[in-house]
Amino acid sequence: MKLKQLEGLLGGLEQFSQPKVELEQYPTGAHIASRMIYTAESSYEDISGKIVADFGCGCGTLGIASALLGAEHVLGIDVDPESLEIAGENVTDLELDVDFLQCDIRASNLQGLLVDTIVMNPPFGTRKKGVDMDFLSLALKVASRAVYSLHKTSTREHIRRAALRDYNAKGAEVLCEVLIQLRYDVPQMYKFHKKKEVDIAVDLWRFVP
């Protein structure tokens, strides 16, 4: 599947009808999601034929993109049942086979999951400080092949230091690199948003535990 075709299919997905600010729910746009998953497959072969998990999957965009690019099995995990309901509808509309699990990633023991690749657009940590690193820390413990994650460009050095520190302390190594810088379009979704749309610079990271 070509990049443009993937982006077109993702552009038709339903997104949050009543987003929850406490969960930092923002849709992962088709432009950014398609490039994220397409890069993971075309450059590193981390999607096709692999077991893929989408941590904090929301309405399922990254997991669905992985299924469209040939993942053997996809599991989407999110704490919000309403988001998972929308994700299920999106999967049904595209006639894909994706499983979903409702749980709080930070409060659940997911280290027993057999997962090759984890893809995620975690909360940036603007409402709950450190939640982005909680997601990343767990993903690095679960994924056997690679983790692809989106983080604010302004936190780049913090992300790098934290990832290296977390693993070096355990006597292990982790490869972490920024693959590309992207523009995350944040629409006016909440009452405190003053502008109709805001572009935020984000990094697409690839971590190899």
Image (tube, helix red, strand yellow):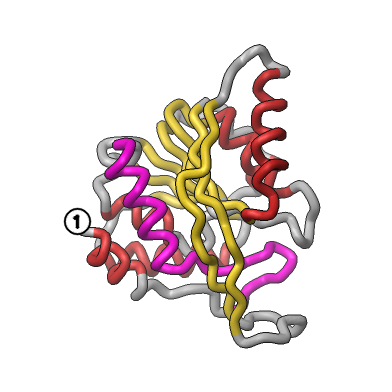
Q: Quickly name the residue at label 1.
A: 1
Q: Label 1's element?
A: loop
Q: In the image, what residue type sits under mark 1?
A: Met
Against 196, is 82 above or below?
A: above
Percent coordinates x, y for residue 171 in the rendering:
66, 12
Q: Is residue 134 visible?
A: no
Q: Residue furthest top?
A: 171
Tell me where residue 127 sits by quadrant: bottom right
Q: Which residues are magenta?
A: 18-45
Question: Is 62 on the left or on the right of 120, as rendered?
Answer: left
Against 6, is 157 above or below?
A: above
Q: Residue at x 32, y 41 (%)?
A: 47
Q: Residue at x 50, y 64 (%)?
A: 28
Against 196, is 147 above or below?
A: above
Q: Residue at x 79, y 56 (%)?
A: 128
Percent coordinates x, y for residue 4 in the rendering:
25, 66
Question: Is 110 on the left or on the right of 85, as rendered?
Answer: right
Percent coordinates x, y for residue 92 in the rendering:
31, 65
Q: Quadrant of the N terminus?
A: bottom left
Given residues 88 and 128, the one toward you in this image is 128
Question: Is 77 on the left or on the right of 66, as rendered?
Answer: right
Q: Main secondary structure of the magenta part?
A: helix
Q: Residue at x 46, y 68 (%)?
A: 29
